[in-house]
Image: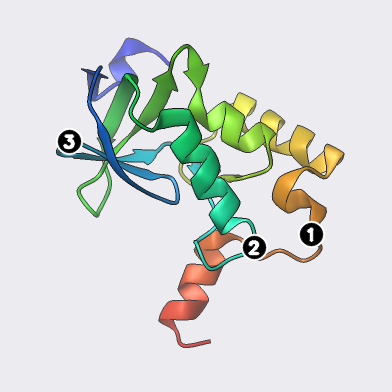
Amino acid sequence: MPVRDWFLAALACCYRVLNVQNQEILARKYRIQLKGIDAPESSMPYGKEAKEELVKLVGVKCLRVLVYGEDRYDRCVGDINCNGKFVQEIMLKKGLAWHYSAYDQRIELATWEKEARAKRVGLWALPNLKKPWEWRKDKRQGR
């Protein structure tokens, strides 16, 4: 990403991860929404597995967070690297998240999701799986 596209670059090293909800991380005082991906809600298929993988990746570790800005819920939206691993890449390759192309058009995210789909790993092993943003919309509308 070009430097001009970064709203803020923050080093969140040695922040203790306090809570993880889907792909949202609370580290000390910052809520960080992983840019470009959307994981299943906890009550959806693979929701528990996605949360467990994220906790395994970032729990009580030093995080390098590149923040692009904030979302409408006042969360930092950014990329997270932990011990040299790009968290969004791992979540997509393991089939534990969708590429959220409405908000992020990076080709590598689409490629990693496509590879996981082709291998039918994680949530891609299930037929007719509803996307989390559609699931949340249906829930809000009482469906």
For the point 29% across and 15% down, which residue is it?
4
| Horizontal relation, residue 58 to residue 75: left or right | right
Residue 7 position, x and y percent, is 24, 25
Q: Amino acid at mark 3?
A: Arg
Residue 41 position, x and y percent, is 50, 61
Q: Earlier in the sequence, mark 3 or mark 2?
A: 3
Q: Earlier in the sequence, mark 1 or mark 2?
A: 2
Query: In this view of the protein, which residue sits in the foreground, 28 or 5?
Result: 28
Judging by the rendered image, the residue that carries numbered circle 1 is 126
Q: CA distance from mark 1 to mark 3?
A: 36 Å
**Helix, strand or loop for disc 1:** loop
For the point 20% across and 48% down, which residue is it?
74
Q: Earlier in the sequence, mark 1 or mark 3?
A: 3
| Horizontal relation, residue 98 to residue 9: left or right | right
**Helix, strand or loop for disc 2:** loop
Query: In this view of the protein, which residue sits in the foreground, 65 or 28?
Result: 28
Q: Is residue 5 above or below residue 35?
A: above
Q: Is residue 66 above or below residue 55?
A: above
Judging by the rendered image, the residue that carries numbered circle 2 is 45
Q: CA distance from mark 1 to mark 2?
A: 9 Å
The answer to the question of whether label 1 and label 2 lie on touching residues, with beta carbons closer than 8 A, is yes
Q: Nearer the viewer, mark 1 or mark 3?
A: 3
Check the image and name the residue furthest to the right.
119
Q: CA distance from mark 3 to mark 2?
A: 29 Å
Judging by the rendered image, the residue that carries numbered circle 3 is 28
Query: In this view of the protein, which residue sits in the foreground, 94 or 107?
Result: 94
For the point 52% across and 31% down, which residue is it?
88
Q: Residues within 10 Å of mark 3 (few under 14, many from 20)?
A: few
Residue 23 in view in this figure: yes
